Image (spheres, rainbow, N blue to C red):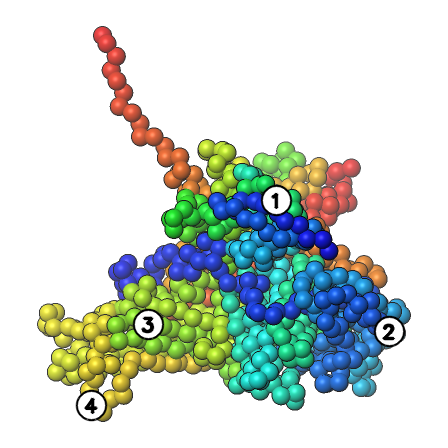
Amino acid sequence: MTQTIPMTSSAIGGMGHSMKRKEDPRFLQGKGNYVEDVTLPGMLWMDIVRSPYAHAKIVSIDASKALAIPGVLAVITGKDLEAYNLHWMPTLMSDTQMVLPVDKVMYQAQEVAAVIATDRYIAADGAAVVDVEYEELPVVVDPFKALLPDAPVLRTDKPGKTDNHIFHWEVGDAAVTDKAFADADVVVKQDIYIPRIHVASIETCGCVASFEKTEGKLTVWMTTQAPHAIRTVFALVAGHVGLSEEKIRIISPDIGGGFGGKVPVYPGYVIAVAASVLIGKPVKWIEDRMENLQADSFARDYHTTAELAATKDGKLTALRFKTLADHGYADAAANPSKFPAGLYHICTGSYDLQAAHVEVDGAYTNKPPGGVAYRCSFRVTEAVHAIERMVDIMAHQIGMDPAALRMKNFIEKDQFPYKSVLGWEYDSGDYHAALQKAMDIIGYDDLRREQLEKRARGEFMGIGISSFTEIVGAGPSKDFDILGIKMFDSAEIRVHPTGKAIARFGTKSQGQGHETTYAQIVAQELGIPMAHVQVEEGDTDTAPYGLGTYASRSTPTSGAAAALAARKIREKARKIAAYLMEVAEEDLEWEPGKFTVKGNPEAFKTIQEIAFAAYTNHPQGMEAGLEATHYYDPPNLTYPFGSYICVVDIDAGTGQVHVRRFVAVDDCGNIINPMIVDGQIHGGLSMGLAPSLYEEISYDEAGNCLGGSFIDYLVPTAVETPNWETDKTITPSPHHPFGAKGVGESATVGAPPAIVNAVVDALWHLGVRHIDIPMTPSKVWKVLRDHGVTG
Amino acid sequence: MSMRTVNFTINGEAKSVQAESRQLLVHCIRETLGLTGTHVGCETSHCGACTIDLDGEPVKSCTMFAVQAEGKSLTTVEGLAVGGTLNPVQEGFWEEHGLQCGFCTPGMMITATALLRTVNEPTETEIREAISGNLCRCTGYVNIVKAIQYAQRKMHPTPAPEAVLQGGD
Ligand code: FES
Ligand code: FES
């Protein structure tokens, strides 16, 4: 498959043009339509009573004071849902999770009861006076302690469960790896913790559930990245109470940022639906920021012991990772079902490693459930962090420049498609070129000289590299499913008689600009100006089935589907053009927008003329109309990559890390809209910076959440965020219909190790080997103090 | 709860609304007046999604009661475009890709518009400081800064260098 994309005119606005976004005029004028903007006649409000304890028995719930408030219509508890067998629900990982508890709570801020009232303030008044009597139970916060034999068993709901262990998963050849370690000249070993963090999209989660009794139809406007999957889950969970899939309509309107946090089904959604069904009126539930941070799915929480082996001249020979994953009280990760640790085994990264072994164990603790992504494809950030840290540690250990060590061990350009020792087939790459470009842009050699001078003066300056390989676009359906639903995705295109088109997709933009980029794909393939292509997503009654937008999968899957649906349309258009011009189909040549008779540039039919003919003058025996649907099942994942270089200066007095420069060279294959790709990388880098320096959700011994509001969960502002410098190389994916790879998450995955590597690089000569993120001033200051630098 | 009548001007229109004394201004704007362009991202003064212009100052409407708006002049995102024409800040956000999900955008643009009204040529540092009360999770701020610089150039174009008059002699 050739992957050179012809450039269309800017009037058509196909791939490669930085077209302004079609969705922007409504956002710029306050006319977006987010879930909280949906108001229905007679709509009620829901507020949730939450547990102050991390682990406690519920002795009693007394709702009488709440029910006495004028305007409070109902208080729903676990017992009410139990009557319909709706008090538990499955998670996306086929574990179970409470909708509302009947006998005990498992984490602080867990939903305990829901108050339904005529107004948001009255619902909150009601929630404040629901009396819940608790009896505290022993709390398990540390996943290592959770696995000790004497730890209290948390999931007493599971018959026969005698411990807090969720799963053991391993990949790679342990014996071969052990031997490679035994034979190695140099082995480095490091414990690395990647803490629990939260996506904190600026829009929180919520829904408006509206059950129409006469027709038995449920419509839910909902903050979801995967509306079709949600519809099916609702039908599976509530089929026994009469919710049938054809009567469920999920509408995901404008979404104020998702980043993975809007993939799961949260109890609040289910309670709002149950309330609407029970009461027969629409019910709105919008969580506040503290509920969002304290109860919604978290990301990361991986404790890894990483080892890397090499020859003394810096040839990497083997990798061994052992990881403990803290999943909270339920495994509610959003991984494809075969992969309990997601795609963590991409952890051999950009390097040609011949031996590797990876083990992951999951543990239950008294924390909210999760393990969903934070703008990354299924545990890829954890994998990249560990390998990129270890490569840097190895370089410093053997006294080799970290760039040189990487160059020496990269998979070579001509090794692609490359089969990794842990089983992936990397589609394409040119890792040397990306790193070299980043080094040239930032002036690597000069920076190293400057660093030496500064070090001689006692100043701390560091340079950190991260050369990551991403794995996105799930996925080939033979390996990838969520709850059994295969991870294909879809596009449906209809060309109207006047040559304009509507295109609908199974994905759902949350800011990525699909209304623009999908229109550009259709414009590229059909030559219809992108301005004339209307894109719709997010309404399950109209859009074709799809698995949604996360894991950077929209362009690799639905984008591909758009191209292939358009090509089906083009083939039909060719037949119509041949008929109209009375020539053989083979005599026609396509260029975006028209078929021309070979050798006669005057004889052509435009796509608009052909579209009109498809409805007014089509050949006898041919179906009328000009439309196509395609369900795309990718043959492989795509492997975007990049090299990032970060320069930091550390204030020895305060421990403050200042990111002076950050150069990101990304390769996401062919590009649909360069402006949007740049924007995605800027955003991704910022969400790489955030957990590196600021964000963490931690817990005290009693299970109290210590990062549960924007007062202590520090989302970076414009002041902390550096002026990102971006550039690119282009290595098309050989198997994607137009050579694209996906880009939304690369930067979040790639940035953190560059920042940590820079900080450790500044301090290595003091004896510092590693610092866990977030590298807050107090943490760095303590490291400096422990190494005799500051008082 | 006691209801009060509150009078204010919003986007140039005089309004008289009934508000519970505890009602937050943002809820009055969104729910009573149906102007849903102003958003809520935290209700604790941290995110800035609810920023509106109140008598020329950007304020967080989640941290004011509706009754405190008595007699004031308010501008929300719906009031930025004049006669259907985007103001320079809105135009800049579109041109420079200063928005992605659009959720922070109304508050961000209100803050930026107020900045450019008071400071003619803000430096990048001044721009970043001015918007530091408005969180954006999508854009990484780079293009928001560029959008504001675009608006600044549009509002205060550098005068073309005047032809130098030769003096006598
Ligand atoms: S909603 Fe007002 S500052 Fe966040
Ligand atoms: S554009 Fe999404 S929060 Fe700013």
Name the residue at the top extreme.
B169
Q: Amino acid at mark 2?
A: Ser
| Chain of the residue on which disc 2 is drawn | A
CA–CA distance in space, label 1 to label 2: 43 Å
> Dot 4: few (<14), some (14–19), or many (≥20) neighbours within 10 Å?
few
- Residue under numbered circle 1: B69
Location of the N terminus of chain A by quadrant is bottom left
Dot 2: element:
strand
State the residue at coordinates (88%, 74%): A59
Q: Which residue is mark 4?
A: A620
Q: Secondary structure at mark 4?
A: loop
Give the Cα separation between the discs numbered 4 and 2.
Answer: 74 Å
Q: Amino acid at mark 3?
A: Ala
Mark 2–mark 3 CB contact (< 8 Å): no
Q: Which residue is mark 3?
A: A501
Report crowding for label 1: few under 14, some 14 to 19, many 20 or more residues within 10 A (C-alpha). some
Looking at the picture, tell me which residue is in the foreground, B111 or A486. B111
Q: Nearer the viewer, mark 2 or mark 3?
A: 2
The three-letter code of the residue at mark 4 reads Gln
Closer to us: A39 or A486: A39
Query: Where does label 2 land, which residue?
Result: A60
Pointer 2 local density, CA inside 10 Å: few below 14, some 14–19, many at least 20: few
Q: Is residue A421 above or below residue A304?
A: below
Q: Position of residue A351 (x, y in %)?
A: 53, 65
